[in-house]
Image (cartoon, rainbow, N blue to C red):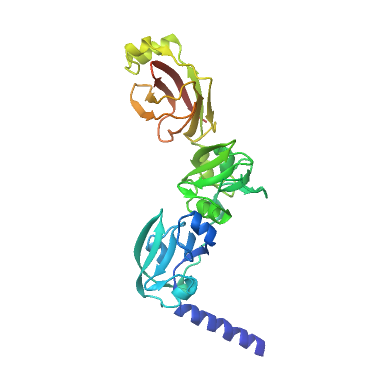
Amino acid sequence: MKKIILLIVLICTIQHLQSQQAYLGITSNTLHPQKAEKLSLPPFGVYITSVVPNTSAEKAGLQPFDYIYQIGDEKIDKDNDLHDALNAFEPNDQTSIYYIRNQQKTVSNLTFGNRKNQNNYRKKSTEDPFLGVHDTHDDAMKGVDGVKVNIGEGSTADLIGMKNGDVVTFIDDYPILDWHDLRAGINNRNVGDPIEVTVFRNENFQTFVGRIKSEAGHSELDKQIDLEYMEVKVLPMPEEEMETAEQLNIIEEEEMEMEEMNPLDISVFPNPNIGQFTLEAEISDESPLFYQLFDSQGKQVISETIPPSATRISKNFDLGNNPAGVYYLKVIQNDQIMTRKIIIARS
């Protein structure tokens, strides 16, 4: 009986102490000095890996990958960690929080909450974003910072075109140096949000884009995403198609006389996709090239000049908000032209 009473007293004491503690609402890591140096960050700060919904941190606009180095007058250093800094405040205290985001120093105002009154909301499995990668237990490529992964079949990673052995180097614009970064990059979104993953593969960096699925297969959100999947076909344009393109002012009269540029190969991946795909082509010249994409009515969808690069070009397209149907691609380099018909069919 005494043990039960002592346990109740202990619980009540912990709850009372929690009610007196300033609550920020983040999970974070203290960076190793070598990692901080690689990221050009000062030592001893804390790297946010996730933000708890409806907390002081979320209301102040904090995000994963923000790097906190000071709260109010409390600087975070080797003698004063995040816990020490928070102990200087109580619930409802108002102060400023100083952090670095994308190499820029930023400050936000916040009002501390109370851990006791925090609603510990947990996402359902159908709401939990899931890339679908796991550790290879191999080191990343020498000289390349990143995380080497294997891919789960049918996962988001699989569907957007990632492969076993890829080294993940960036998620969106954030560098990925370890699994803490990788988890932060995945958890920093909702199911159905876009995700952009850059990997190192075969001595090259490649970027894959798509919408992230949930960990629980066949959820209602997944079904909504799956309905948006498209298949892309890239076909040569026969003479009658060229005449149609000329009538729609897609191809100018003088362009009809240009020499045809024949790439060694053209590939599209992933395929099928959700309207976000990468088109790669092997060309024989490193000169700048100009390309345009038109819809079937001759309306220009994309127009861009690609500066001089290697003879293998890689371009990301996002046509997820465009209707399925026929599109026309025109590429001009020097005095040569390449035309292709792109057929996008929804599954």
- Residue at the (52%, 37%) spot, across then down: 206
- Residue at the (52%, 34%) spot, across then down: 273
Where residue 141 sits, quadrant-wise, is top right
Q: In this view of the protein, which residue sits in the foreground, 264 or 274? A: 264
Q: Visible in this render: residue 60?
A: yes
- Residue at the (35%, 16%) spot, across then down: 251
- Counting from the top left corner in percent of width and height, residue 82 is at 47, 70
Q: Visible in this render: residue 128?
A: no
Q: In this view of the protein, which residue sits in the foreground, 154 or 332? A: 332
- Residue at the (40%, 54%) spot, across then down: 103
> Up-down: is 72 above or below 273?
below
Asked if residue 28 lies left or right of residue 247, the reply is right
- Counting from the top left corner in percent of width and height, residue 286 is at 45, 25
Asked if residue 292 lies left or right of residue 7, the reply is left
Q: In this view of the protein, which residue sits in the foreground, 278 or 16? A: 278
- Counting from the top left corner in percent of width and height, residue 328 is at 41, 21
**Quadrant (top left/top right/bottom left/bottom right) for the N terminus:** bottom right
Q: In this view of the protein, which residue sits in the foreground, 13 or 282? A: 282
